[in-house]
Amino acid sequence: MRVYSASAVEAALETPALVEQLRDIFRSKITVPPRQHYSVPVGEGPAATLLLMPAWQETRYIGVKIVSVFPGNGQQGLPSVMGAYVLMSARTGEPLAMIDGRMLTLRRTAAASALAAKYLARADASRLLMVGTGALAPHLILAHAMMRPIREVVVWGRTPAKAEALARTLTSRYLKVSATTDLAGAVSGAHIISCATLAQEPLIHGEWLQPGQHLDLVGAFTPEMREVDDTAIQRSRVYVDTPMALKEAGDIVQPLRSGVLAEQMIAGDLAELAQGRCHGRSFHSQITLFKSVGTAIEDLGAATLLFERTRDERMTLR
């Protein structure tokens, strides 16, 4: 069994190839049982969550991601989300690979957003706003920049110093990255707005939005969380990664409950976009919104690409 470290996963999963892999796997027949959530007590601190995310493709591969979410880890200088991915043969059940689950998740999540943007963002989008400064932020920025002609990036975070540090890290001769404390102004000037936060209340207000923008919402992965307000939902043509977003994502769940959004108003999901069963952006000035909660389909696609790209190498990747 091969073992893939975080650095090996990051090096092997290049965004363009991973985006195409995800498009292909969303067109394929994949079995995805419901993910399992378990609450784990952690002494006097906030309870942790254990998630099991299986998927398989008949006669090819079986995969399961084991994810832990420990909200109190930040106080110890540790990531709040960690995990591992096990890839097995769907012919024999033989374990084939153990993969760093955190990096696999970062790479496939960013690639899924980039895939959605290929269908939903304007082809000439050149200005990106990144809302959030966590581990996913640099992956989202670079993924979007590879799929659209992004030349300018503005980063906003609750802690300005973190936004400034991220901007310094990513600035290059091809990409101008700066930090801002003016979120409203940054929203109005962006072509793509990507959000990856733990916000409990909306950060993006619909009155700030401009014609032709694309919203990429990656945070707010529980029904209680929000990254955009109701006005933003009302002004947008809404897409999701999978139907699970209707049960798990606060930016979808809450508007559905209040009647601001009706289920039939959701234009489609990634599988329907990839298979041509629904249309993406219809006109230049349309505002589009993509809500992602993640899916084991993406994990299996990323793990499969990683394994098949490196299986001829003799040494374990560490």
Image: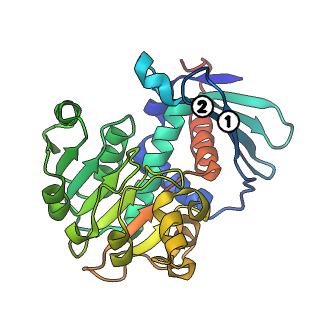
Image coordinates for residue 109, horizontal then vertical, percent:
48, 47
In the displayed structure image, the side of residue 273 where residue 42 appears, left or right: right
Q: Which residue is mark 1?
A: 39
Q: Nearer the viewer, residue 2 or 190?
A: 190
Secondary structure beneath dot 1 equals strand
Residue 47 is labelled as 2
Disc 2 marks a residue whose amino acid type is: Ala
Residue 137 is labelled as none
- Around disc 2, counting alpha carbons within 10 Å, would you say few (fewer than 14), some (14 to 19), or many (20 or more)? some
The extreme right residue here reads 92
Q: Tell me whether the residue at label 2 lies in contact with that at label 1, contact meaning CB atoms closer than 8 angstroms.
A: yes
Secondary structure beneath dot 2 equals loop
Residue 107 sits above or below residue 257 on the image: above
Q: Quadrant of the N terminus?
A: top right
In the displayed structure image, the side of residue 212 where residue 34 appears, left or right: right
In the displayed structure image, the side of residue 191 where residue 40 appears, left or right: right
Q: Nearer the viewer, residue 11 or 202?
A: 202
Residue 28 seen from this side: yes
Res 172 → quadrant: top left
Image coordinates for residue 214, horizontal then vertical, percent:
31, 66
Res 260 → quadrant: bottom left
- Count of residue discs: 2
Q: Residue at the location (22% across, 45% down)? A: 156
Residue 66 sits above or below residue 186 on the image: above
Q: Nearer the viewer, residue 157 or 113?
A: 157
